[in-house]
């Protein structure tokens, strides 16, 4: 059985971190995000199809370094085809039933349970569902008590929402779904294909699970997942190998070989590999990129400093994204499309 991992997005909402790396390789507790997804795959999945485009070589090298006991197929899209187009592009590698998984999700979904549910309901497609408070930011599922989905309402006002359940980014599909997708076009699975399948077959289901779920689409959710995992693992901080920390840390994560100077306080922040924060700095809810330097006497709140950037001494910054290097060629100026949330 195959699992398609959708990992071809630019991750524009996570720029500048995604100017230099694929979103799915962004470290979470110092481990590339895609690893959490690979760990979720049930034994029935013997083939992983990587639907890639932007920064494909980085993703391919990382997967090869893992020596997984599964066949890896790198399916390189000539151009981004969207979540639907990417699935159609993988058609020649697919058999009768397959998973499709967004690569930017961290959750407690048990894929074996979704397989059992899908079989029991004789579904054409089953998607994972997760309850949210802020329905007006999402496509919300209209679901019957038995899990049958009759439609989606895009970004409803809370009073008009059919439920509080949204697509959690993992699907199990029968191959007949492929007949609904046109070849070689930018197509959204969620917005264009699922509604047609619902109308035609009435055998489209939602599987609600418990535990945790987070879509790591934005800097705020990138910070939040770390706080969540630190709490879950009962840790005050998480510190990588070969760090030299002479400052104070609170609910923060340091990658490997990070240097923290004297009288520096770091709270609720993520400092990636080989970064340096010099003396007398205060950082709160910041992300500091790989090999980046924050010079002495900086006071930063909700600041993202891209990889290899150097911030000069004595700044007081709030809510800023700092990137002074050229933007990679072909990187879109704005979000191309989004599947979860706005
Ligand atoms: P934003 O630009 O910030 O919206 O991020 P994104 O490009 O990753 O888009 P989004 O978060 O909506 O994507 C959800 C999942 O689908 C992620 O795992 C993406 O890597 C993947 N994805 C999005 N667009 C494409 C595409 O055109 N091709 C492939 N193969 N995957 C895609």
Image (tube, rainbow, N blue to C red):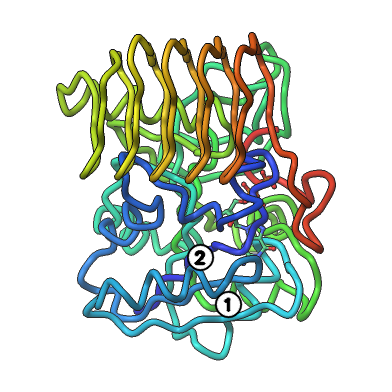
Q: Position of residue 88 (x, y in %)?
A: 65, 77
In this view, 37 is above or below 152: below
Q: Position of residue 42 (x, y in %)?
A: 24, 65
Which numbered disc covers residue 289?
none
Mark 1 Cα shell of 10 Å, populated few (<14), some (14-19), many (≥20):
few
Label 2 belongs to which residue?
A: 124
Q: Is residue 141 visible?
A: no
**Residue at disc 2, secondary structure:** loop
Q: Ligand 1 is in which quadrant of the figure? A: bottom right
In this view, 314 is above or below 190: above
Q: Quadrant of the N terminus?
A: bottom left
Q: Position of residue 96 (x, y in %)?
A: 44, 82
Q: Quadrant of the C terminus?
A: top right
Residue at position x 60%, y 54% from top?
A: 20
Mark 1 lies within 8 Å of ligand 1 (Cβ measured) = no
Q: Is residue 265 visible?
A: yes
Q: CA distance from mark 1 to mark 2?
A: 8 Å
Q: Which quadrant holds residue 76?
A: bottom right
> Which residue reaches farthest left?
234
Q: Which quadrant holds residue 95?
A: bottom left
Label 1 belongs to which residue?
A: 176
């Amino acid at each position: 059985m195959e699992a398609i991992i959708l990992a071809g997005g630019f991750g524009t909402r996570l720029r500048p971190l995604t100017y230099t790396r694929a979103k799915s390789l962004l470290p979470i507790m110092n481990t590339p995000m895609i690893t959490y997804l690979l760990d979720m795959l049930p034994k029935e999945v013997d083939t992983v199809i990587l639907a890639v485009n932007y920064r494909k070589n980085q993703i391919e090298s990382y997967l090869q370094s893992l020596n997984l006991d599964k066949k890896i197929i790198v399916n390189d899209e000539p151009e981004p085809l969207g979540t639907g187009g990417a699935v159609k592009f993988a058609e020649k590698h697919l058999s009768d039933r397959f998973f499709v998984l967004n690569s930017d999700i961290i959750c407690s979904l048990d894929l074996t349970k979704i397989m059992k549910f899908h079989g029991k309901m004789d579904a054409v497609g089953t998607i994972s569902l997760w309850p949210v408070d802020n329905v007006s930011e999402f496509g919300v599922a209209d679901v019957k008590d038995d899990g049958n989905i009759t439609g989606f309402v895009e970004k409803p006002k809370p009073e008009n929402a059919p439920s509080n359940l949204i697509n959690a980014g993992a699907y199990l599909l029968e191959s007949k779904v492929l007949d609904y997708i046109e070849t070689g076009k930018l197509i959204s699975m969620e917005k264009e294909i699922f509604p047609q399948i619902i109308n035609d077959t009435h055998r489209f289901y939602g599987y609600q699970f418990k535990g945790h779920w987070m879509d790591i689409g934005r800097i705020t959710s990138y910070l939040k997942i770390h706080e969540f995992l630190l709490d879950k693992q009962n840790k005050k901080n998480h510190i990588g190998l070969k760090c030299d920390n002479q400052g104070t840390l609170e609910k923060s994560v340091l990658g490997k070989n990070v240097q923290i100077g004297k009288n520096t306080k770091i709270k609720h922040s993520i400092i990636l590999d080989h970064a340096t924060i010099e003396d007398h700095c205060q950082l709160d809810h910041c992300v500091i990129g790989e090999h980046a330097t924050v010079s002495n006497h900086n006071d930063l709140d909700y600041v993202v400093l891209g990889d290899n950037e150097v911030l000069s001494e004595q700044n007081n910054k709030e809510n800023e994204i700092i990137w002074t290097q050229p933007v990679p060629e072909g990187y879109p100026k704005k979000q191309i499309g989004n599947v979860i949330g706005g």
